[in-house]
Image (tube, rainbow, N blue to C red):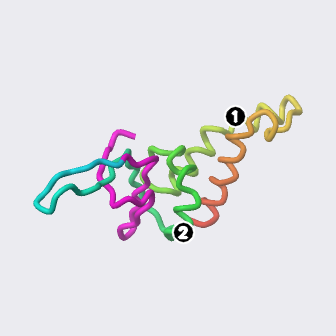
Amino acid sequence: MPINRKSNGLLVEKFGDYAHLYANLTEIEVEDEEGVVVQYEGDLAVMATTLDILTLEDYREALIAFYPAYSTLDAALSYLERTDYMVIKCVELGLDIKDEYPEPHALREVARAIVRLES
């Protein structure tokens, strides 16, 4: 995530049709006219979305893993496409994807949920 921006301390913010998702935040102290002020900054992912703020908070980590993408829907679809080979490999070899690729399998479940919500 190349963009590093200041935040008001929230890991997820929504501005109109755009979600601002932070992987993590670092507390920094800045001195101004009122004295020392605590601010937060972190790596920022910006995506167009129709999801509500609560859903974005639930899926923040997965969406950050799917980044970069223009929108949350594109991010989810792209992740599914990038990991399709895992499903094909497991089917061909008679393996259980949950056992062979536990983390990607869990993220694929989230990606499918996002696609259903966005469609």
| Residue 100 horizontal/vertical position (percent) | 79, 33
Name the residue: 65% across, 38% down: 83
Q: Earlier in the sequence, mark 2 or mark 1?
A: 2
| Residue 28 horizontal/vertical position (percent) | 29, 48
Taking the magenta stretch, the answer to whether it contains residue 25 is yes
Residue 60 placement, left or right of 103 = left
Which residue lies under the disc numbered 2?
A: 54
Q: Amino acid at mark 2?
A: Leu
Magenta span of residues = 1-26
Please, which residue is most extreme toward the top here?
A: 93
Residue 10 placement, left or right of 7 = right
Asked whether the viewer can see residue 82, the reply is: yes
Q: Quadrant of the N terminus?
A: top left
Say few, some or many: other residues with alpha carbon within 10 Å of mark 2 (under 14 / 14 to 19 / 20 or more). Answer: few
Taking the magenta stretch, the answer to whether it contains residue 51 is no
Residue 85's disc number: 1
Q: Is residue 32 above or below residue 95?
A: below
- Between residue 29 and residue 40, name the one nearer to us: 29
Mark 2 element type: helix
Q: Amino acid at mark 1?
A: Tyr
Q: Quadrant of the C terminus?
A: bottom right
Asked whether the viewer can see residue 119, the reply is: no
Mark 1 element type: helix
